[in-house]
Image (cartoon, helix red, strand yellow):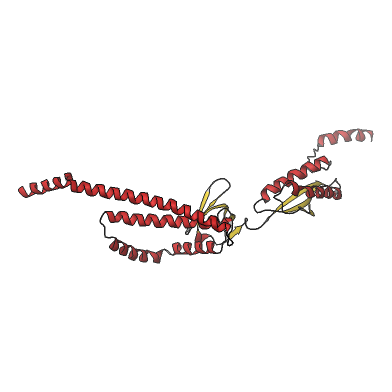
Amino acid sequence: MEDALTKWDEAVDYVTGPELWFAVGHGTLKIILILIISYLIIKVGQRLISQFFLRRREGPFSITERREATLKKLIINALTYVVYFTAFIMILETFTLDIGALLAGAGIAGLAIGFGAQNLVRDIISGFFIIFEDQFSVGDYIHASGVEGIVEEVGIRTCKIKGFTGEVHILPNGNVTQVTNYSIYNSYAIVDVSIAYEENIERAEHVIAELLEELPEIYPEMVAVPELLGVQNLGASDVVIRIMAEVEPMEHFYISRVIRKEVKTRLDMEGIEIPFPRLVMYSRHDQETAQEPSKTGG
């Protein structure tokens, strides 16, 4: 009984004694200091990385803005991971844990897990080649794995693609087997214009050709004067004339809408009709009524 009381007194003295609280305070202060230093290192690193790419842009070995944005974001992410991992190890050391044994065990466990993590390795390797070969970069408009949108981020394992309606698709790099990049080269805006059969097709083509000559001065997104390809199709109630315009990357949606508006306005000014659906009403009763006098007269 006395031994139990003695141990209890020793435990109470240890909990209420200054040594424990000094150790707790010292550990807490050390953890806070580690977190603050980690935060400052990341912020300073981001600033240095941004300045590095800014100076490289002004130098003789400059790279494209899209590739610069991708590499800068990737390096910042890698720096963040390394700093956070180092801070985590240092925090564990404050709890007097054996970091060497922990890392050794983690290495053995990682080797065992690695045999089953083939998809992870494939994603990392695919991500490396996406960046190294510059298949696509941040800000590009692409179509990949059934997803279409603007690239928000290219990471080591995944890439993020944002659609027009705001949704963000996260694709593992290993699943990106085929990519269509719309942002590297100039795009083409293709517009079909319908003309009524009753109109003079040659006159309509002449009016449209004159309009196309004026458009590049109004819309600088056009690289050259749009080309009037001619009659594309003979429809049921219209003649389809096709227009093709070379424009800057990703401007074909906008220019297609502009060409349709400008052509419609010019054709209206010239009195050239664009066909619209017509409905012919047939009344059997009216036809029988019109035929009755002739039958009576016979």
Residue in the image at 31% along x and 50% along y = 31
Of residues 152 and 283, the one drawn nearer to the viewer in this rendering: 152
Q: Is residue 192 visible?
A: yes
* Position in image of residue 39 (x %, y %): 40, 50
Q: Quadrant of residue 56?
A: bottom right
Of residues 33 and 58, the one drawn nearer to the viewer in this rendering: 58
Q: How many marks?
A: 0
Q: Is residue 186 left or right of residue 5?
A: right
Q: Is residue 249 left or right of residue 50?
A: right
Residue in the image at 34% along x and 51% along y = 34
* Position in image of residue 32 (x %, y %): 32, 48
Of residues 102 and 38, the one drawn nearer to the viewer in this rendering: 38
* Position in image of residue 95 (x %, y %): 26, 54
Q: Is residue 277 left or right of residue 85?
A: right
* Position in image of residue 80 (x %, y %): 42, 54
Tell me if residue 117 comes above or below residue 80 in the rendering. Answer: below
Q: Residue furthest right?
A: 298
Of the 4 image quadrants, the one containing the C terminus is top right
Q: Is residue 1 visible?
A: no
Tell me if residue 190 comes above or below residue 297 in the rendering. Answer: below
Of residues 125 and 42, the one drawn nearer to the viewer in this rendering: 42
Q: Residue furthest left?
A: 2
